[in-house]
Image (spheres, coloured by chain):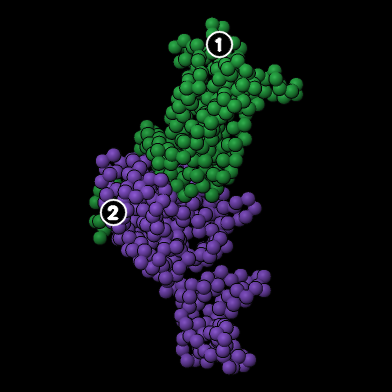
Chain colours: A green, B purple
Amino acid sequence: MTTALSPTAPALLRRPSRLTTNLTFISRSLTHTIRTPDALVMAIMLPVILMLLFTLVFGGAIQGDGHYVDYVVPGIILLCAGYGASSVAVDVANDMTNGIIDRFRTMPLRASSVITGHVVASLVRNLVATGVVIGVAFAVGFRPDASPLEWVAALGLVAVYILVITYLFAAVGIASGGPEAAQGYGFILMFLPYVSSAFVGVDTMPAWLRPVAEHQPLTPIIETIRGLLTGGDVAVDGGQALLALGWIALILAVAIVWTALAFRARAGRR
Amino acid sequence: MTDIIAVSGLRKSFGTTEVLRGLDLTVARGTVLALLGPNGAGKTTLISILSTLVRPDAGTVTVAGHDVAREPEAVKAAISLTGQSAAVDDVLTGAENLRMMGRLSGLTRSAAARRADELLARFDLVEARGRRVKTYSGGMRRRLDLAISLLSTPPVVFLDEPTTGLDTRARAALWDIIRDLAATGTTVLLTTQYLEEADQLADRIAVLAQGRIVAQGTAAELKALVGGEVVSLVDASGELVRELPTDGTVEGLRAALDAMGTDAATASVQLRRPSLDDVFLHLTSTPTGADSDTDSRGRELAATKG
């Protein structure tokens, strides 16, 4: 009987390498994504529906010349990223409230790598969703005039934004009490694009709201992407681009520190 | 050192709630210790501290020669924990769970796959290996959880209420596995609410109440604290009227019946072995603030001991 338990069992747990740990957690989270396609489908469907809504239904009223699609696509892309990233909060919250996090924390490995796994999987998920959204945008008449270099810069900015917002949602997932709460907080963050220059110019907003919309982080990011994709020969507003990068760096720093602190605080308090 | 787990003066509070109040405990290498205690006694908190999940407020705690607060990484390499809620991934299959955890335990890909196959066979999960864990029954989840804990053979294994919620057959199977583990020289510390379980598996039993170890010994020693038998008086409707422990002799029985008074003369008499309830009530009764039923009953039992 005793031999049945441990013929090939190693006597002690060996600490796996950082790389192995991260790859294992990434592959776990990617498997989750493939096996629970609802999140992926929703992350693609909602922005596509919104884009069709804004271009085909509201577009004529907002801007009658038929070029509204060129204006709105950058905002839709960021909205899509935010929506897709919000599911990482639920994934993380699920892990944190399930016994599995205790298992990871009593193994000789960096338990916070489980967060890295979710973040990377979410990044992959979101890039796929963004690709679909851009494809649909072309189908409804999106005609950017970006050079290849501008495309690379725009997509790079989108990818970095997705990473940042995913990290932020991971922190939300750790700090929230559970998956339901995480979903609720996620919703709040998702309304941010509406109060920005994503859908309408900020100069159409009431005077009291304008400063909020002008100075919130999404506006410079959207303006920069829009400038790159559809700005024609006009150079991107350097100030806006710097502001966009500054906001992204700041939010990323906050999210990483918050994730680390929240993970340590939450750990062992179940 | 012979004590693979040594705890002294351990204190832990959560907010204003003092959960562990100066707990001392030692576990000899290669033995099975059952930690018995009512809900809220601090069993899970103690396990969490021993497995480095929770930091102690005061006291020293060493596991496998390493201090849990100062050298948590060394402790983690020497233990495995099976907690109360099964720590398995619902979306993955049983085999995938084992292989993933094997990789995270430092096994190579092929070694993890080989070990997973062995454990699936050992824990009777071969049929279910390709199914997602979401579809597993409670007993299957427990078995998988325990199998993951045994991917390697750490010197110390913690099991927090391993058989809670299992049917009789699954429980017996789990007991066999724990016995196998003990036979290989692994030190096992398990918590349970069932005296029978402690009786079956443990070399020693420690009773935890109100944040302290209030008694330690073999199952027989603990039961002896309560007395040999318990006399119960039951009225016509089957309602319990009164209970007293006795030593099981004619003399003792007569004395106990006399002590119960004459108002219950028509009640029927029953004799039974002491239960875990009796041991608990006996050991956890407090001399102060005793106006509830349990307290007064506990005191009666305690009073006959000396």
Question: Which residue does the image show at 46% across and 89% down from the upper left?
Answer: B249
CA–CA distance between discs 1 and 2? 61 Å
The one nearer the camera, A206 or B193, is A206
Question: Which residue does the image show at 60% across and 51% down from the upper left?
Answer: B14
**10 Å crowding of disc 2: few (<14), some (14-19), many (20+):** some
Locate residue A119, reporting x and y percent: 47, 33
Q: Chain of mark 2?
A: B
Quadrant of the drawing holding the N terminus of chain A: bottom left
The residue where tag 1 is placed is A231
Q: Is residue B185 left or right of residue B206?
A: left
Locate residue A60, reporting x and y percent: 61, 21
Check the image and report above or below for B224 versus B179. Answer: below
Secondary structure category for the residue under label 1: loop
Q: Is residue B37 left or right of residue A18?
A: right
The residue where tag 2 is placed is B126
Check the image and report above or below for A138 versus B215. Answer: above
The kind of residue on which mark 1 rests is Gly
The kind of residue on which mark 2 rests is Val
Secondary structure category for the residue under label 2: loop
